[in-house]
């Protein structure tokens, strides 16, 4: 079977299956069914916008707060806020305790 015949058979089979599966979606609901409760716009807005936006904010904050620890090399020294190596305390002139 050459590639043109194979492609044509796959496309036609897909087209027939899509049409056969979509025919049930054109049916009306039975007349004995009651209408369900209507859902307001605010519910859909919360479900489709607010929840994903909240999850985006939470994941972004988590990434921002953990990124410095993940990007620091294993043997790196924390240089402090000024970007320089912390200085040891100055030596004392007091005699050691007995």
Image: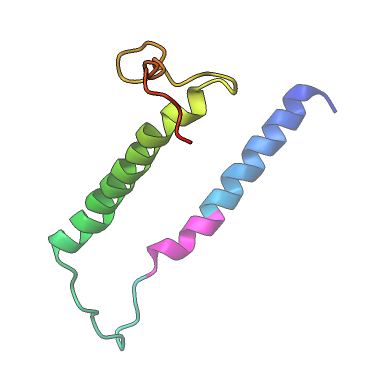
Q: Position of residue 20 (x, y in %)?
A: 55, 57
Give the farthest residue toward the bottom.
Answer: 32
Q: Residue furthest front?
A: 98
The image shows residue 31 at horizontal and vertical percentages of 29, 84
Name the residue at 19% across, 69% down: 39
Does the stretch in magenta take in 69? no
Q: Which residues are magenta?
A: 20-27
Nearer to us in this view, 26 or 89: 89
Where residue 89 appears, x then y in whole percent? 38, 19
Question: Observer-nearest residue: 49 or 33?
Answer: 49
Q: Is residue 43 left or right of residue 23?
A: left
Residue at 34% over, 76% down: 29
Q: Residue furthest right?
A: 1
Query: How many numbered dots are placed on residues in this image?
Result: 0
Is 88 placed above or below 33 here? Answer: above
Residue drawn where x is 34% and y is 72% of the image: 28
Give the image location of residue 47, x and y in percent: 26, 57
Horizontal relation, residue 9 to residue 31: left or right: right
Using the rendered view, name the quadrant where residue 15 is placed. top right
Q: How is the image coloured?
A: rainbow
Among the 4 quarters of the image, the one containing residue 86: top left
Residue 25 painted magenta: yes
Majority SS type along the magenta span: helix
Picture residue at 20% right of the left edge, 78% below the top: 37
Q: Is residue 27 left or right of residue 34?
A: right
Q: Is residue 95 left or right of residue 53?
A: right
**Position above or below: 95 against 19:** above
Dividing the image into 4 quarters, which one contains the N terminus? top right
Up/down of 42 relative to 91, above or below: below
């Amino acid at each position: 079977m050459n590639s043109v015949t194979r492609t044509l058979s796959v496309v036609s089979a897909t087209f027939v299956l899509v049409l056969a599966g979509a025919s049930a979606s054109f049916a009306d609901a039975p007349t004995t069914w009651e209408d369900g409760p209507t859902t307001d716009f605010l519910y859909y807005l919360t479900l489709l916008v607010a929840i994903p936006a909240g999850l985006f904010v939470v994941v972004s904050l988590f990434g921002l707060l953990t990124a410095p620890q993940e990007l620091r090399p294993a043997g790196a020294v924390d240089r402090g806020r000024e970007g320089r190596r912390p200085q040891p305390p100055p030596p004392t002139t007091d005699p050691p305790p007995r």
